[in-house]
Amino acid sequence: MSAGHPPPTVLIVDVHEKGEAMNPNKALWEKGDFTRIAESMRDSGETLVDRLGITSGLRMLDLGCGDGTTALPAARRGADVLGVDIASNLVAAGNQRAQAEGLANCTFREGDASDLNELADDSFDLVVSIFGAMFAPRPFDVAKEMVRVTRPGGRIVMGNWIPNDRTLVAQILKISAAYSPPPPEGFISPVTWGVEEHVLERFAGAGIPEERISWSRETYRFVYAASPTALLGAFRSYYGPTMNAFEAAEATGRAAELRDELEALFHRQNTSPDDNSTSIPATFLRVSVAV
Ligand SMILES: C[S@@+](CC[C@H](N)C(=O)[O-])C[C@H]1O[C@@H](n2cnc3c(N)ncnc32)[C@H](O)[C@@H]1O
């Protein structure tokens, strides 16, 4: 397991009244309200979609779509978009946003990137997953499923946070991990999707040779019309992994220390000249796969 893993999802295993254990991956993302963070990511979502070469009628799957930061701009440019996400609250938020814009070519439904059994083989021209599928368990299954539902000649584009990178998200995950109990045996860190060797190995397992995979390091920007402290407050209240880290830190009496460390990070990384607004760049690995 590499450093910089987010707090283990096992912390939030929930038990329903009927006694069935809830899927911890689903519980993590339904715990908060990621829409509150996604609001700060819309500009970069638009920029990324601008470069996807969307054409009218292109069949696109947005996997781990959240509330549609990339799905909606793609639909506005004419793609037929299906957004799939494990969190029911985000699926509902995505459908609401699409309906509010009258985008009949954009629908969202619940599903797990590790097992897309409701989707037929070769269904999509383009599968996109921006900081989405990387959070699903069983990365080899994720790669297989993405390849399976992409038609031959189609493309997969992933955006993945990079372990130990010096920019915002990798640092949030790394700092949070230091305040959290060790993850359970066998846990595979999501940020391993930000390491080229792992990406090659996972897609090789899905039958994709190395020469069909390319990557670049790119930047997403978190833009927020309030201070970095306020943006950190949104992460603390609404972003599942940060919520878990604070819960773990509270249990050991270290919550103030965690807050101070994250607050210093957010302020240090803010490039906005104005203290009452936030603009923080974060580096990610963009992976392109020709299927
Ligand atoms: C950091 S958010 C990114 C959301 C969106 N792609 C965006 O750019 O705003 C991670 C998303 O992945 C989803 N996710 C996590 N595990 C998943 C899984 N196993 N299958 C599908 N979606 C998953 C979460 O519910 C969440 O919406």
Image (tube, grey):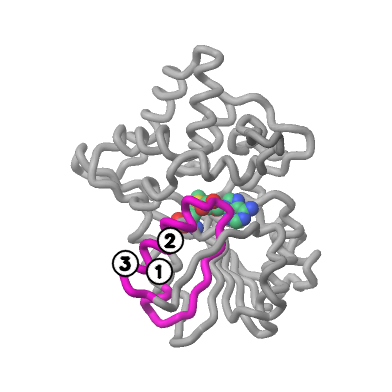
Earlier sequence position, callout 1 versus callout 2 = 1
Label 2 SS: helix
Tell me the mark number nearer the camera, choosing from 1 and 3.
Answer: 3
Instruction: Estimate the x, y position of residue 153 in percent, counting from the top left.
Output: 66, 85
Can the viewer see residue 213 in this picture?
Answer: yes
What residue would you read off at disc 2?
94
- Is residue 99 on the magenta stretch? yes
Classify mark 1: residues with Cα within 10 Å, few (<14), some (14-19) or many (20+). many
Q: Which residue is mark 3?
A: 100
Between 213 and 235, the one lying in front of the other is 235
Is 92 located above or below residue 126 in the figure? Answer: above
The relative height of residue 176 versus residue 76 in the rendered view (above or below) is: above
Q: Residue 4: give x, y in percent of width and height.
A: 60, 37
For the point 64% across and 34% down, the residue is 17
The label number, if any, that marks residue 6 in the structure image: none
Q: Earlier in the sequence, mark 1 or mark 3?
A: 1
Residue found at the far front of this picture? 18
- What residue is at 63 percent from the left and 44 percent from the top? 25
- Measure how far apart labels 1 and 3 are at the Cα level: 11 Å
As helix, strand or loop, the secondary structure at mark 1 comes to: helix
Answer with the quarter of the image where residue 211 lies.
bottom right
Name the residue type under label 3: Ala
Query: Could you tell me if the residues under marks 1 and 2 are in contact, i.e. CB atoms within 8 Å?
Result: yes
The residue that label 1 is drawn on is: 72
3D distance between C-alphas at marks 1 and 2: 8 Å
First to last magenta residue range = 74-103
Q: Residues within 10 Å of mark 2 (few under 14, many from 20)?
A: many
Q: Does 210 lie within the magenta span? A: no
